[in-house]
Structures are given as C-alpha cells and as structure tokens.
Image: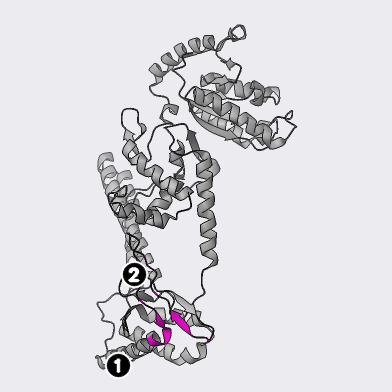
Amino acid sequence: MEQKKIYEVAVYLRKSRDDTDGEEDVLLKHETALTDLVRKNNWRYVIYREIGSSDSIDYRPEFKRLLKDVENDFYDAVVVMDYDRLSRGDKEDRARVEKILKLSNTLVVTPNRVYDLNDEDQELITDIEGVFARYEYRMIKKRFQRGKKIGARLGHWTNGPAPFPYVYNSEAKSLDIDPNKLEIYQFIKKRLLSGATCASICWELNRMGIPSPKGKLWQESVVYRLVLNEVHLGRIIYGKTSGGLHKNRKTAPFRVNSRENWVVVENAHPAVKTLEEHAKIVRLLEQRRIHSKRTRHGTYVYSGLVFCGKCGSTMQFQPKENGRVLVKKCQKIDPYGNRCGNPGCDLEHVNKAVVESLRDYEEEIRSKPIQETGSNDLTPQMMLRLRETELDNLHEGVSRLKDLYISGDLTKQEYRSRLDRQKDLITKKENEIQQLKETLQIGGPVSDKDRLQRIQTLNNVWEFLDTKPGEKNRLLKQIIERIEYTRDGYGIDVQVKFR
Ligand SMILES: [Zn+2]
C-alpha cells in the first residue's frame, strides 16, 4: 500500500464509557495498537492523551487542543481507535468536529478504516487504498495552492545544532545518526545502565582521549544532559518555551511552558534509546540525586569561603564528636579521574590565620588617609536615579515626535524613522537600568568606610554568636571574598582575599 502523502498524524487516546474492564490497561492497549499502526506506516506522530471520559467537548481539554491544531492544519490525519472517540456528544459537537476535519482536509484513520469527510462516496469505499488515492489527489492540489503545510514543518529539526550522536541532514531537515558517534553514545548508555556514575564515565572517556561533543574534555553535566535527552527517543519537542530573549528587541515575554502545552512529535528521526532504557536512566539518576541530597551538611562558620589552593574547588567540613570541626581532604577529581588530595586539617588553624589577616587588614585600612566619597563618584543608587530620569525624557520625546507629526512639522517618513531611533534609545536605556538594578542587588563597590564598619560589627558580636554559625558565616562573607587553603606536609598556607 502506498501512502506517501501522509507525513504527520495526531494520535488521539481517550477512554470511552464502554472501556470498563481494567481502566488503565484499556488505554495502554489502545496506545500500543495505534502507535504500532503509525510506526508501521512510518508517520511522524503527536499523542493527545485524554484523562477523563466525558462525551462533551467542553470537558475534554486534550481534544480541544487537538481540534485547534487540526484547524491550524498541523496534521494529515487523526488516528483513533474508532470514529466514535472523536465525537459522540451531541449533534452540535459532532457537526463542529466534522466541519473542522473537512475544512482542514484531515483524514480520520482507525485500525480498520480510513474516513475522508470530503469524500461523498466514502460510504462505498471500504478499502483504505481507495480513500488514500482520492485524498492524495486533493492534497497535491492543496499543497500546490497553499505552499507548504504548517504541519509539514512539524517533524523538522529546528532546535539548533544536532545533539550528539546525530548530524543534521539539511535536505530532509531532520536528524541522521553519525555511526562513529553512535558507538560512543552506546558506550555511555551501557556504562550508565550498568551502574557507572556520570562522573566516572567522563573520566573513562577522557582517559581514552575521546573528545566531548564540543571537542573538549567531557564534563559530568554534559554526560548528565546527554543521557536524559528525549531527542534520542526519536522525539522532537516543540514549544518548551515561548517568547524571546532578544536583548534589543521587544518580543513577547520569555516563559517556560508546562509539559502539557508542549508538542511532542514522535518518530521524527531514528531513535538511539528505547523508552524502557530512558525510564531506567531517569530512575537511576533520580535515586542518586535524592541520595546526595540527604547527605548534605549544615552551615559552618566558613561554609562556602574556604577554597582549595591546589585546584580551586570548595573545601568541605566535617564535625567531630569533641565539638571541633575538620577541613576535609580535598575530594576534587580532575577530568581523568585523579583526586586532588590537598590534605585537611583542624579548622582552628584556618580560623587563627583568618583572625590574624583580619587584624592586619583592619590596620592597613586605618593607616590610609580617610577617603570621603568623591563628589564625582556616583553611587549606583544615584546612577540608577539619573538613568531613570533619562528614560522619562526619552518617553517624553516620543510624545513630542507625535505632536510634531500631527502638527505637520514632520512627514510620515521622517516621523517613522525618528520614532524608530527613539525606540532604540529607550530599549538601550531600559537595558542599562536593568543591569544597574542587578548590580545593586549583588551590592555595588564597597568603600573603606563600609569595610571598617563591617569588621567592627563582626568583632562586636563574634563571641555572642557561637551557637549561630550561619550568622557568623553571613557576616564573614560581607568582608571576605575567599580563603585559599593549601597544605604540604606540616606546612599550612592560608590566603585571605577581602572584598
Ligand atoms: Zn583541591
């Protein structure tokens, strides 16, 4: 049977009131039957899964979404278990559904029959081939008249560079598998499924000299994202986000859409992992995430402040039974799997060094001539106010331009081009203001006066805060940017960098 003219179909799943035995199983059976049918014909498909079993369209949100997409000409056919699943409600509903199917020239395909609502003789045609033949002829005409169907873009890869191990096929506008990369992908998948962590897979790959998709060393996060990618299931997902992130142009606000609003096209390109494998990977990674969350530690006085002087990573702490705290041996592992191993020590050594540095630092500031904030130095707050006034002026400029246009002092063309320029300036100014606001949130540049004040506060309250390490940590972070710790044998080096 030749069915070349069908590319994209919608699979609609819905419980009917008749499906009384074993609730979920009936839907699953239907899903298997329909996806088998669709895959056998090599159609790309999007599944619409209705949870409720209401007859009225108003209570079938997925069906409403399907109708809208059919109306927008997304699909060549709707695939259902039986025709009644589409419209069994009242006459009005039925008429509405049939009208939309007719106007968009969308077929209805069931495992036993094909319905073509534009074919008046269809009652007479019981074989599928006959319907397709007539339908194809109309489709050719329609495509010719209207250019490409919107739906024909549905299976196309438009989501940026092809993800590993695929390559973009520009002719078919879809993804092909790169056989060399596939070997690496299968290796990663196999190792993960047999219990290896993302990190250890990275070390293996790096030791083997296999470059990452971007030609660099493999990183844990790259492997993590790779193994969870749904594109590898043969899927393309559209509509994860909407709106734009364009800096200098005003577009609809950027937002992340919820999963039920995504359009998931199945069978869009060859899959490199099965649904079962995917489910197992998701489960494995989720278990590890929960596990690592549970072992998280509380806040210590120096949490997030002490960095390894050898490799730069954050040092961890460990409480001892006697109430002391240890700086743990550096656990950082390089891209090839070698541990850093910068030895730990009693935190007291670090603490002493910090107290000393702090005292030196305070003295150093006091010995400097007192600097009042120069009159030319604008604080970020003042800068922000200034920029906001400038923005107001720019907005006023827009209405002045309008006045000039209305009074005939500007031609339409002049008005247009000057308005465009003004709008550019406004957007630029808005961006500047946004940036300023962001720096204000982080806290702008600190003056020596601020520094002294913060050190004094710290000294005044330090001994009263022994039971509140979190509060000590907060105060320290206002003064100290990072503490670098290195140990070689008995030699301990502590470098304190102030803000
Ligand atoms: Zn280290």
Q: Nearer the viewer, residue 17 or 100?
A: 17
What's the colour scheme? one colour
Q: Nearer the viewer, residue 21 or 83?
A: 21
Q: Position of residue 337 (x, y in %)?
A: 35, 61
* Ligand 1 closer than 8 Å to label 1 CB: no
Query: Where, quadrant-wise, is the C terminus in this rendering?
Result: bottom left
Residue 324 lies in the magenta-colored region: yes
Q: Can you say whether 37 is above or below 458 in the image?
A: above
What stretch of residues is rendered in magenta? 322-349
Given the image, on which type of amino acid does mark 1 rest?
Answer: Glu
Q: Can you say whether 101 is above or below 462 in the image?
A: above
Nearest to viewer (mark 2 / mark 1): 2
Q: Can you say whether 42 is above or below 211 in the image?
A: above
Q: Is residue 6 visible?
A: yes
Ligand 1 is found in which quarter of the picture? bottom left
Q: Quadrant of residue 86?
A: top right
Q: Which label was assigned to residue 340?
A: 2
Residue 73 lies in the magenta-colored region: no
Q: Is residue 453 visible?
A: no
Given the image, on which type of amino acid does mark 2 rest?
Answer: Cys
* Ligand 1 closer than 8 Å to label 2 CB: yes
Which structural element holds mark 2? loop
> Total number of numbered labels?
2
The Cα atoms of the two marked residues, 2 and 1, are separated by 36 Å
Which structural element holds mark 1? helix
Taking the image as shown, residue 270 lies to the left or right of residue 465, namely left
| Residue ID for mark 1 | 363
